[in-house]
Image: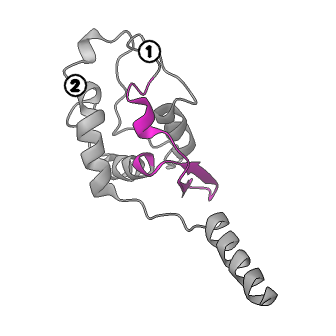
Amino acid sequence: MAGWIGKIFALAAALTISVPAWSQDAESGEEIYMNYCATCHGLDAIGNGPMAGVLVIQPTNLTKLVTSGGEFPTERVVARIDGQEPLVSHGSPMPVYGPFFEGRDTTIKTDSGQSIPTSKPIADLIAYLKTLQGEQ
């Protein structure tokens, strides 16, 4: 009996500790972008949304995030969205949607292979932003 209990606890621990990262969903990311980001960054993500004119700091062109070395700055973008690297452009740190982007329920990898814990909405949003690189 004790052997079974130990196996159950080991299985439960394995499931809670090594939950595989969900795959990033660019389609969900596009929907998130349109609902939460397009107001400032624009439908085409170049920084020309309807609220851009009232912001102290103009929104970034999200189609030009890839570095000169060809890497997408995943860590920096995650930090900007989840508030670790605050941007005060409209009287409050970005993001203005707070709890929606909070959490550490998945991980994504940088181009160098580093794992970054983040929320599923941010992972999906980054997947979408990666599809926009070089469009403009």
Q: Residues within 10 Å of mark 1 (few under 14, many from 20)?
A: few
Label 1 or label 2, whichever comes before in sequence order: 2
Residue for point 23% across, 30% down: 42
Which amino acid type is shown beneath numbered disc 1? Ser
Between 103 and 129, the residue placed more toward the observer is: 103
- Residue furthest toward the right? 2
Identify residue for label 2.
49
Q: Is residue 29 visible?
A: yes
101 magenta-colored: yes
Tell me the element at label 1.
Answer: loop
Kindly report which numbered mark, 1 or 2, lies closer to the viewer in this rendering. Answer: 1
Identify residue for label 1.
92
Residue for point 23% across, 39% down: 34
Between 88 and 134, the residue placed more toward the observer is: 88
Q: Which residues are magenta?
A: 94-122
Could you tell me residue 125's position as x and y percent? 37, 47
On the image, which quarter does residue 109 sit in? bottom right
Q: How many marks?
A: 2
Could you tell me residue 131's position as x and y percent? 33, 53
Which amino acid type is shown beneath numbered disc 2? Gly
Tell me the element at label 2.
Answer: loop
Could you tell me residue 118's position as x and y percent? 53, 47
Quote the CA–CA distance across marks 1 and 2. 18 Å
**Vertical arrangement, residue 95 with respect to residue 102, above or below:** above
Quadrant where the image shows the N terminus: bottom right
- Residue furthest toward the front? 1
